[in-house]
Amino acid sequence: MLKAIIVGAGHRALTYASYARQHPNELQIVGVADPIAARREQVADLYDLPAERCFCSAEELAAQPKFADFVINGTMDHQHVATALPLLAAGYDMLLEKPFAVSEEEMWQLVEAARLHKRKVAICHVLRFAPFYTAIRQKVVEGVIGDILNVQATEHVSYHHHVVGYVRGKWNSKAKCFSPMLMAKCCHDLDLITWMKSGVPPVSVSSFGSNMQFRPERAPAGAGTRCLVDCEIEPDCLYSARKHYLDHPNRWA
């Protein structure tokens, strides 16, 4: 049985950690590190953790004697490397949420730390394990569909996901999450494209875009300044904060 600690107790890390509840003979959650007390308490309740196994930060956790095999690092994009370094130094292997770094400099810091401390760092590119994509890749590798000369990939983000994550959410600007849109939303796609043609590195990567829809001059008639305060059309609006958050309090936790 493997023992793991949750670092950054948000939706993504809790989803990965739920494997322990489904397969308790294979994985056990033995600790949590998160600056938000309510989230520490949530994890402690889920996995019956004592108070001494709940920490406010990765640094506080790393200062303790090692008591797990690996950590599940589900912190925000710009926190990935900063939280990973002390934990790798403390001897933990790591399951690290993507994108694993927000700059080339950080990338090399992480790589060098993993090598120095002889630790394993697995990046959560989960679509590699989806049956649909593994089947396609197998056909590509076997040459069944011929030579791949170019790949055209389109990321269709559903309206509610887009609003929650990239308009109201923590990924609505590079200044907040430190990741450009290409990394914040499309690192899945970039990984799949290079994975399909394993061993063939990309020559260049670029993206472009603009804020077309969510601008003051495009607001519909009757729209207020705050969704739940003075907006007359909120009850029938696709982007209602009430529908997305209050009616489903755990969906976007």
Image: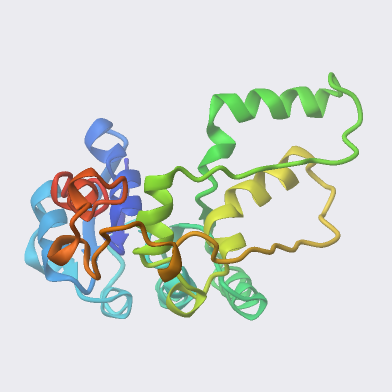
* 167 up-or-down from 189: above or below: below
Quadrant of the frame with the C terminus: bottom left
Q: Tell me, yes or no, if residue 120 can be seen here.
A: yes
Q: Nearer the viewer, residue 178 or 116?
A: 178
Q: Tell me, yes or no, if residue 215 can be seen here.
A: no
> How are the residues colored?
rainbow
**In the displayed structure, does residue 245 sit left or right of residue 106?**
left
Q: Nearer the viewer, residue 76 or 246?
A: 246
Q: Residue at x 8, y 66 (%)?
A: 51
Q: Nearer the viewer, residue 134 or 47?
A: 134
In the rendered image, residue 88, in percent from the top left (x then y), is placed at: 46, 70
Q: Nearer the viewer, residue 146 or 119?
A: 146
In the rendered image, residue 174, in percent from the top left (x then y), is placed at: 51, 75
In the rendered image, residue 251, in percent from the top left (x then y), is placed at: 24, 46
Q: Residue at x 44, y 68 (%)?
A: 217
Residue 67 image-quadrant placement: bottom left
Q: Residue at x 44, y 62 (%)?
A: 218
